[in-house]
Image (tube, helix red, strand yellow):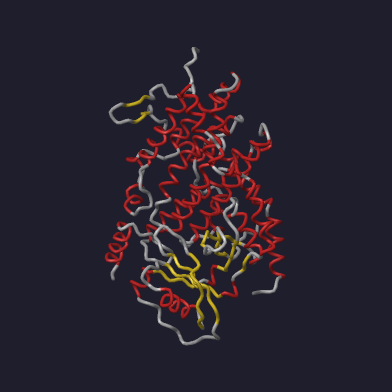
């Protein structure tokens, strides 16, 4: 029986236009195209998403504040290749998630991490992720209707659709009937 | 830093309310306990689709059918959130699924009870999802970042599960004599299994102290169970329904609803695999996994033909 330890993709979703893409979790998928599809099925059952990005999890370079306090900043390695752009995601609050902060240019993932920490400041970062921008797969404008539209007309997925508090209040207020 | 200093620094972080993230130092036992808990939680979401999935085709109207479909879909998604949270600790989904399909893995015993009537859809939502929400709201404050985030997302989505069930129980309890009989029967069958869902009493729960010390849990089994009984018991009685516990009473001094003794023999019998539906649940998961094999093969074949990035 074949099983599917397919590659993992980290998923970033945008709740409103203009808001940063934020890490929602991860999916397994055989390729980046299906990763978008799986991300939509797993993370967009409700109408709070206008855009999805997926990135291969094994291409993310990660650094935590705890690692820096233990071992210092990683040494910048010698240039390994040409300069390329990396997207930067930072987790800034204890309960928060990794938010898109911007981009840096660097010759390697390790160098991009060091660049991200110095560009965006070490003070309030808890976790930094960088990933080559060319590996980011994004939903296109013409997919938005078909991917995110169906979640908009399902109000019964929201707890406010059920008036249990009102029903209980009505029953409490009713005169007791003799059995 | 030696091992003892690392552990002290780790516990100080937890004490300050910091979240532990992948990459951070953690004791092996913290990792082991989390993988155990998160994988069991994930399996519970997946197996939890089965008792309700069985009633989708028999829903009494389209509204109830849409609601039940949406709820079961959510459970599938919640299972995925959780498998991925466990993967950040080094477990693989493949290993976890294999443990479930082979019958080695544990999951919440509540799902080894059969769903016998439509009224069970109401009572499962109110009782079982209500109990799960209490647990998951606590776990949303867990010290491990990825598990905490998965539970925040689950808790936000799951409040609809509880309310759609409670709405049905309320309406049936005020309905025809036939509906009242049906919903009372469902309440009678699900009450005790739900009370047992929180696990053994604290003094018989060997993992509790370390889970609380490391901020994985912030409440004990008995505390969560008491919260559940206090929340649900008075409202069930207000609906003119009864609960199958002659010793159930309100204690003025503590403000708690106290239950009679719990039948732990039954609990352990079901945990150890001898509940009414243990074999049926695993057989259903195996069949679903086998039936999906051609889809996995087709997707893999498609991916192989794509130009690599």
Residue B17, placed above or below residue A137: above
Query: Which of the two residues, A95 or B130, is positioned nearer the viewer here?
Result: A95
Q: Position of residue B229 (x, y in %)?
A: 41, 32
Q: Quadrant of residue A38?
A: bottom right
User: Residue at the location (34% across, 50% down)?
Assistant: B212
Q: Quadrant of the N terminus of chain B?
A: bottom left
Q: Quadrant of the C terminus of chain B?
A: bottom right
Q: Position of residue B127 (x, y in %)?
A: 49, 35
Query: Which of the two residues, A52 or A175, is positioned nearer the viewer here?
Result: A175
Q: Position of residue B81 (x, y in %)?
A: 53, 54
Query: Which of the two residues, B182 or B287, is positioned nearer the viewer here?
Result: B182
Q: Residue furthest front?
A: A18
Q: Position of residue B249 (x, y in %)?
A: 36, 24
Describe residue B67's horizontal placement relative to residue B205 as left or right.
Answer: right
Question: Is residue B283 visible to the viewer in this orientation of the structure?
Answer: no
Residue B97, placed above or below residue A100: above
User: Residue at the location (45% across, 67% down)?
Assistant: A90
Q: Quadrant of residue B262?
A: top left
Total number of numbered labels? 0
Residue A140, placed above or below residue B34: below
């Amino acid at each position: 029986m074949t099983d599917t330890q397919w590659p993992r993709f980290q998923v970033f979703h945008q709740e409103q236009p203009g808001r940063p893409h934020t890490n929602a979790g991860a999916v397994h998928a055989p390729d980046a195209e299906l990763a978008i599809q799986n991300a939509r099925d797993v993370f967009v059952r409700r109408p709070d998403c206008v855009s999805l990005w997926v990135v291969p999890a094994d291409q993310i370079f990660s650094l935590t504040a705890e690692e820096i306090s233990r071992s210092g900043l990683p040494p910048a390695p010698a240039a390994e290749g040409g300069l390329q752009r990396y997207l930067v995601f930072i987790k800034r609050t204890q309960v928060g998630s990794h938010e898109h902060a911007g981009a840096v240019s660097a010759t390697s993932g390790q160098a991009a991490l060091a660049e991200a920490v110095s560009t965006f400041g070490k003070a309030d970062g808890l976790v930094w992720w960088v990933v080559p921008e060319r590996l980011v797969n994004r939903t296109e404008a013409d997919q938005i209707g078909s991917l995110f539209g169906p979640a908009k007309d399902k109000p019964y997925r929201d707890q406010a659709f059920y008036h249990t508090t009102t029903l209980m209040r009505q029953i409490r207020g009713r005169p007791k009937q003799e059995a | 830093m030696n091992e003892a200093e690392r552990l002290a620094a780790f516990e100080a972080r937890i004490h300050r309310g910091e979240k532990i993230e992948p990459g951070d130092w953690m004791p092996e036992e913290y990792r082991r306990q989390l993988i155990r808990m998160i994988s069991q939680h994930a399996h519970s979401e997946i197996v939890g689709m089965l008792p309700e999935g069985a009633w989708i085709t028999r829903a009494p109207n389209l509204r109830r059918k849409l609601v039940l479909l949406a709820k079961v879909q959510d459970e599938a998604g919640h299972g995925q959130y959780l498998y991925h949270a466990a993967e950040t600790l080094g477990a693989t989904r493949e290993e976890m699924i294999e443990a479930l399909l082979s019958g080695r893995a544990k999951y919440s015993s509540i799902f080894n009870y059969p769903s016998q009537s439509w009224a069970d859809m109401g009572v499962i939502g109110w009782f079982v999802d209500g109990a799960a929400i209490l647990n998951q709201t606590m776990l949303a404050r867990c010290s491990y970042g990825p598990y905490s985030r998965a539970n925040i997302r689950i808790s936000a989505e799951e409040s609809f599960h509880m309310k759609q069930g409670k709405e049905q129980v309320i309406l049936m309890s005020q309905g025809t004599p036939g509906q009242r009989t049906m919903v009372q029967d469902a309440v009678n069958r699900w009450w005790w299994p739900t009370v047992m869902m929180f696990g053994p009493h604290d003094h018989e729960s060997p993992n509790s102290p370390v889970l609380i010390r490391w901020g994985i849990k912030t409440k004990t089994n008995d505390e969560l169970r008491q919260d559940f009984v206090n929340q649900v018991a008075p409202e069930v009685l207000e609906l003119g329904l009864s609960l199958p516990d002659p010793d159930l009473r309100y204690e003025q001094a503590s403000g708690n609803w106290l239950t009679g003794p719990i039948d732990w023999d039954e609990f352990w019998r079901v945990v150890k695999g001898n509940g009414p539906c243990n074999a049926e649940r695993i057989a259903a998961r195996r069949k679903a996994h086998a039936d999906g094999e051609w889809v996995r093969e087709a997707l893999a074949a498609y991916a192989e033909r794509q130009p690599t990035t």
